[in-house]
Image: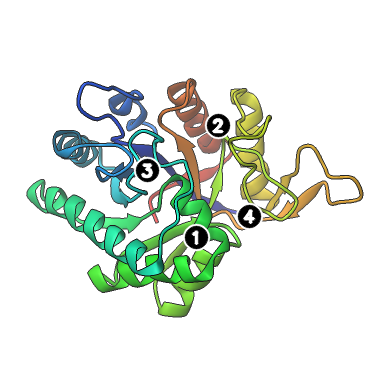
Amino acid sequence: MSYQIDLNCDLGESFGNYRLGNDEQVLKFVTSANVACGFHGGDPGVMRRTVAICAAEGVAVGAHPGLPDLVGFGRRNMSVTPAEVYDMVVYQIGALMGFALAEGVSLRHVKAHGALYNMAAKDLELADAIARAVRDVDPKLVLFGLSGSKLIEAGKQIGLTTASEVFADRTYQSDGTLTPRTEAGSLITDVSQAVAQVLRMVKERTVEVKPAEEGGRSQVPIVAETVCLHGDGKHALQLAETLHKTLQSEGISLMPI
């Protein structure tokens, strides 16, 4: 059986005097980039430079809209209405689209960031607000969302092309959602463990739940169309390079959605 997967990374999250990640090196090993749009990270200069590097490396460019929370890096839940979510997503997609046009590339996808992503995974009203924002800006954009989530459901209902996303460097709960970052064991820092999890998700379409809840399932079914690794992770570059080489050695084709 032949396999094909998109390897994406959250990038462009530096801002002002603050530098995060190793974007230029990581971009050599991924096929899609989710570029921060200035709310949780990123600034105009970082956005422009990140899009330019993506264009030079042939990496698909996507918008990575988040909650307006620089201090919390967009990873803290906020009380926001669907109307507010719609407006902030349209605003951020538009900002990045401007830089993409200036660099002569097309925006390919949209992936919500952090808390906004996780909130929309469970809340259909917020998921619908994001999906409508994407459709209204450009219905050809692909909507990324957690595999099995309300965000994927909302995107399909509104007629968007969706991409079910799985995570290389995060652990899962028995309901198929990501383990909250506030809990121990939410991150996978061992590169070999992360690679093994990706291979299982792509080939076997399941993910192991660690630790398994008492009386619960030890693994859950999952749809893997795009795999995410986090650009701000301590081992992001090593993971990106190892994952890229391993997937290719396993006969898995890497290409953007």
Q: Amino acid at mark 3?
A: Thr
Q: Please state which of the two labelled residues, at mark 1 or mark 3, is closer to the viewer.
A: 1
In what element is the residue under mark 4? loop
Residue position for label 1: 120
Residue position for label 2: 246
In what element is the residue under mark 1? helix
Q: Tell which circle, 3 or 4, labels the residue nearer the N-terminal end.
A: 4
Q: Amino acid at mark 2?
A: Thr
Q: Please state which of the two labelled residues, at mark 3 or mark 4, is closer to the viewer.
A: 3
Crowding near the residue tagged with mark 1, few <14, some 14–19, many ≥20 C-alpha atoms within 10 Å: many
Q: How many marks?
A: 4
Distance between the alpha carbons at the discs numbered 3 and 4: 22 Å
Q: Please state which of the two labelled residues, at mark 4 or mark 2, is closer to the viewer.
A: 2
Q: Answer yes or no: do the residues labelled 1 and 2 have beta carbons within 8 Å?
A: no
Residue found 39% across the figure and 72% down from its top: 160
Q: Amino acid at mark 4?
A: Met
Residue position for label 3: 31
Residue 101 percent across, percent down from the top left: 11, 53
Residue 218 percent across, percent down from the top left: 82, 46
Residue found 11% across the figure and 50% down from its top: 104
Distance between the alpha carbons at the discs numbered 4 and 1: 33 Å
Quadrant, the C terminus: bottom left
Using the rendered view, name the quadrant where residue 30 is placed.
top left
Residue found 35% across the figure and 56% down from its top: 110
Q: Tell which circle, 1 or 3, labels the residue nearer the N-terminal end.
A: 3
Quadrant, the N terminus: bottom right
Q: Tell which circle, 4 or 1, labels the residue nearer the N-terminal end.
A: 4
Using the rendered view, name the quadrant where residue 85 is placed.
bottom left
